[in-house]
Each structure stands twice: as C-alpha cells, then as structure tokens.
Amino acid sequence: MGKPAVFLDRDGVLNVEAGYIHSVEDLHLIPGVAKSLRQLNDRGIFCCLVSNQSGPARGYYPDSHVQALHQRLCRLLAQEAGAKLDALYYCPYLSPPEGGLDPAYTRWSTWRKPNTGMLVAAAWEHDLDLKHSFMVGDKATDVDMAHNAGCVGILVETGFGDRVLAGDYQHHTKPDYIAKNLAVAVEWILQQL
C-alpha cells in the first residue's frame, strides 16, 4: 500500500503566472505558497511538482532553462519557509499540431497533461497511492489529469483558475474542490487526510 501525495502544478499554483518565463529571475512565488508547502512537509506528506513545460518543444529556450527555473523555485521555497518538493516531474514535449517545433521535443507524450504519465511515473518511483492522492492545479487539464489517474482534483483560483471557472479558458471541468489559493487547498487536504 503506497502513501498519499499532493501533486502540484507550477505556474499559477506555486509561482506567479507569467507566461513563458525567459529570465530565471522573473520566477516569483505566489505569497503564502512556501508556508503552505511547509505545512504538508511537516505532516510528512509527499509533495510532487507535475508541470507541462512546452518551452523547449516550442523552441523558446533549452531544457536546461526549465531546470534552472526549478532550481530557483526550490531555492525560494527553502529560503521563505524551509519548504521542499520531494520530487519534480515536467513534460517538455509537445505534438506538432499543438505547436511543437524543436525535433528533440516534438512528439505526442503520455506525460503531457491531461495524460497521466507524470503521475504514474511518480507513483511507481516513490511508492505512492494515487487513489488517495490530490492534484492541485489552475487549469482544466490539471483536474482532468487528476480524474484520469483516480486522484482528487483541486482547482485553485490563482493563475488561470478563475478564468477556467468563468468558462473563459480551456474547457469546463468538475473539480472535487475549488480553493481560493494553495493555502486554502492545503487546509482542505489536511482535513481529508
């Protein structure tokens, strides 16, 4: 029997939604996220980043830039609240019809949300129980991925979340819980566990 996890999207959930971040210094945490993540860390709950990052496939920047952004994210979380992510997964791939250009990253991938590849890989590598896990995101595809993998799907109203709820972004989805931000989501998750 695996352990439950909290899966977290990156942009619009942990850091301020700023489109494709070309300068590492432009990645900024959403106020309060480090403290919320630390609450999960203190309870021994596995915290895992799962993020679509199509910048490399679109030819915007190399894969090493995505890794540099993640190093900054982890550094900021640690500095602000001694918080940490236990694992980081991201999908740099994009299919040709979706706009993939760089041949090294242009392909269909089971890792691209709403497909479940990142969650399955994390569960396999870290002995996680997806049925008792939570996915926190700001897009319909985050909620869809959660449901496709049997997780609880939480939509935060930060990032694109409010636009998803208004029907102005992506498509309609039915989150299991809607939270104003990550702090509210974490409070609810801790009540469920």
Image (cartoon, rainbow, N blue to C red):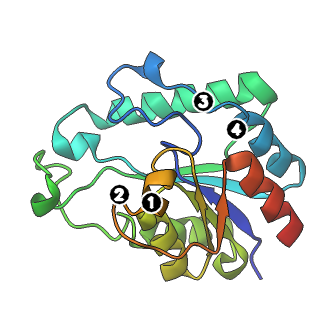
- What is the CA distance from the residue labelled 2 to the residue labelled 4? 23 Å
Name the secondary structure under disc 4. Answer: helix
Compute the Cα span from label 2 to label 3.
Answer: 23 Å
| Above-or-below relation of 135 to 91 | below
Q: Earlier in the sequence, mark 2 or mark 3?
A: 3
Q: Secondary structure at mark 3?
A: loop
Q: Of the numbered discs in the image, which one, if any, rests on residue 169?
A: 2
Distance of mark 1 from mark 4, alpha carbons?
24 Å
Going from the N terminus, do you reach mark 1 or mark 4 first? Answer: 4
Residue 133 lies, in percent from the top left, at 69, 71
Image coordinates for residue 6, horizontal then vertical, percent: 69, 60
| Sequence order check, earlier mark of 2 and 4 | 4
Label 1: state its secondary structure. Answer: helix
Q: Residue furthest front?
A: 166
**Which residue bears the numbered disc 3?**
29
* Mark 3 surroundings: few (<14), some (14-19) or many (≥20) residues within 10 A: many
Local crowd at mark 1 within 10 Å, few (<14), some, or many (≥20)?
A: few
The image position of residue 142, as x and y in percent, is 48, 64
Identify which residue is drawn at 39% across, 35% down: 66
Q: Which residue is under mark 1?
A: 166
* The C terminus sits in image quarter: bottom right
* Mark 4 in CB contact with mark 3 (< 8 angstroms): yes
**Along the horizontal axis of the image, is 97 left or right of 177?**
left
Nearest the viewer among 144 and 103 is 144
Number of the front mark, 2 or 3: 2
Q: CA distance from mark 2 to mark 1?
A: 8 Å
| Residue 170 can be seen in this image | yes
Residue of label 4? 33
Q: Position of residue 114 (x, y in %)?
A: 39, 70
How packed is label 2: few (under 14 Cα within 10 Å), some, or many (20 or more)? some
